[in-house]
Image: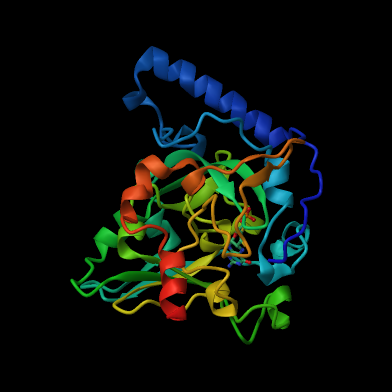
């Protein structure tokens, strides 16, 4: 991710987005009449909206699906939407292994229990200085981790994106990054109720460019932690290596959205919400401080690590 000022993306409503909004209105009205327990769980737009959702205006679908970072398809913001049809998402499975009592290979169908789907409208902030508000569909990662029963040695959760050395995706044919893309969280972060495995957005399955069929969403961290198209999840005792952090210390392992970080290249007090002209203040923990600040009682862990290394 090289910092560039985001090009203007004009908000434009698409058919699918307006259908989504109609469905939502219909469901809200039905819920008021019937009580939400009677609502059908399909289509996906019927998923109940989580209380963790922000009320801020949603970024238009067109912008969410055409202004992307997905280096497997190239480094330009438009590359993923142009090229992501090369991503084959069926069949798909996710292996969970490492420090767990029940290592399991889940097919996508095993994971997509419609009864556990929620809609979460989250702020999404990239280190490059732009942000969006995205109506994700998904379920808490904690629910999946519980199913495989972590051992007492499990301290971290590592994630791996799709990579087949024999059939590399367009961006993987160059060494833009060390493939496969890898990310990781501390186990208390991974099992925090805000941490989501997303399978859709705007009421429909995830578009390929947004990380189909399954991606991580950690809304209080910079976007690069939210790894796309996950094929493997490994619980570990030692802190795993992660793609951007290996490239430079400036991409901290924790990468919590912070306002004050003079020591880091990638810290900003301001951000550009895609579709808006004026910049706005970046909020501590991207606006989720109330929910997550207690995970970091000793202050920002990236800054503490950096200072410790210097000693
Ligand atoms: N995951 C993979 N596998 N490859 C990537 O290049 N880019 C990251 C993250 N997850 C990336 C990835 C970055 S830098 C950001 S900001 C977000 O995805 C972008 O998500 P979006 O395109 O859905 O907005």
**Residue 125 x %, y %:** 59, 50
**Residue 302 x %, y %:** 45, 66
**Residue 120 x %, y %:** 47, 40
- Side of 88 where 108 appears, left or right: left
Q: Quadrant of the N terminus?
A: bottom right
User: Which image quadrant for residue 81?
Assistant: bottom right
What is the residue that sits farthest to the bottom in this orientation?
166
Foreground residue among 238 and 115: 238
What is the residue that sits farthest to the front in this orientation?
311
Q: Quadrant of ligand 1?
A: bottom right
- What colour scheme has been applied to the protein in the rendered image? rainbow
Say which residue appears at 45% left-offset and 68% top-offset.
93
Foreground residue among 172 and 272: 272
Q: Quadrant of the C terminus?
A: bottom left
Say which residue appears at 74% left-offset and 35% top-offset.
278
Residue 262 position (above or below residue 29): below
Q: Is residue 293 visible?
A: yes
What is the residue that sits farthest to the left in this orientation?
152
Say which residue appears at 61% left-offset and 47% top-offset.
269
Foreground residue among 167 and 57: 57
Give the number of callouts: 0
Q: Is residue 212 visible?
A: no
**Residue 39 x %, y %:** 39, 27
User: Which image quadrant for residue 190?
Assistant: bottom left
Residue 76 position (above or below residue 272): below
């Amino acid at each position: 991710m090289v910092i560039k000022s985001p090009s203007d993306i004009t908000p434009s409503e698409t058919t699918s987005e307006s259908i989504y909004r109609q469905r939502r209105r219909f469901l809200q009205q039905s819920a008021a009449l019937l009580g939400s327990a009677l609502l059908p769980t399909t289509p996906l737009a019927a998923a109940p909206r989580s209380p963790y959702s922000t009320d801020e205006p949603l970024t238009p679908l067109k912008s969410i699906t055409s202004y992307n970072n997905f280096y497997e398809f190239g480094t330009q913001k438009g590359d993923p939407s142009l090229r992501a049809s090369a991503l084959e998402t069926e069949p798909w499975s996710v292996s969970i292994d490492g420090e767990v009592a029940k290592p399991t290979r889940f097919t996508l169908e095993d994971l997509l229990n419609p009864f556990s789907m929620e809609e979460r409208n989250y702020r999404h902030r990239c280190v490059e200085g732009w942000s969006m508000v995205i109506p994700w569909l998904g379920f808490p990662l904690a629910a999946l981790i519980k199913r495989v029963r972590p051992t007492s040695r499990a301290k971290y959760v590592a994630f791996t994106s799709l990579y087949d050395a024999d059939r590399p995706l367009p961006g993987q044919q160059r060494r833009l990054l060390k493939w496969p893309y890898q990310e990781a969280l501390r186990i208390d972060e991974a099992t925090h109720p805000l941490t989501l495995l997303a399978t859709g957005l705007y009421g429909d399955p995830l578009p390929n460019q947004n990380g189909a069929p399954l991606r991580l969403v950690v809304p209080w961290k910079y976007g690069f932690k939210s790894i796309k198209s996950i094929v493997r999840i490994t619980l570990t005792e030692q802190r795993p290596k992660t793609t951007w952090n290996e490239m430079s210390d400036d991409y901290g392992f924790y990468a919590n959205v912070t306002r004050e970080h003079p020591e880091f290249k990638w810290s900003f007090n301001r951000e550009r919400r895609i579709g808006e002209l004026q910049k706005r203040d970046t909020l501590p923990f991207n606006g989720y401080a109330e929910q997550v600040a207690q995970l970091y009682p000793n202050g920002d862990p990236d800054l503490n690590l950096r200072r410790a290394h210097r000693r």
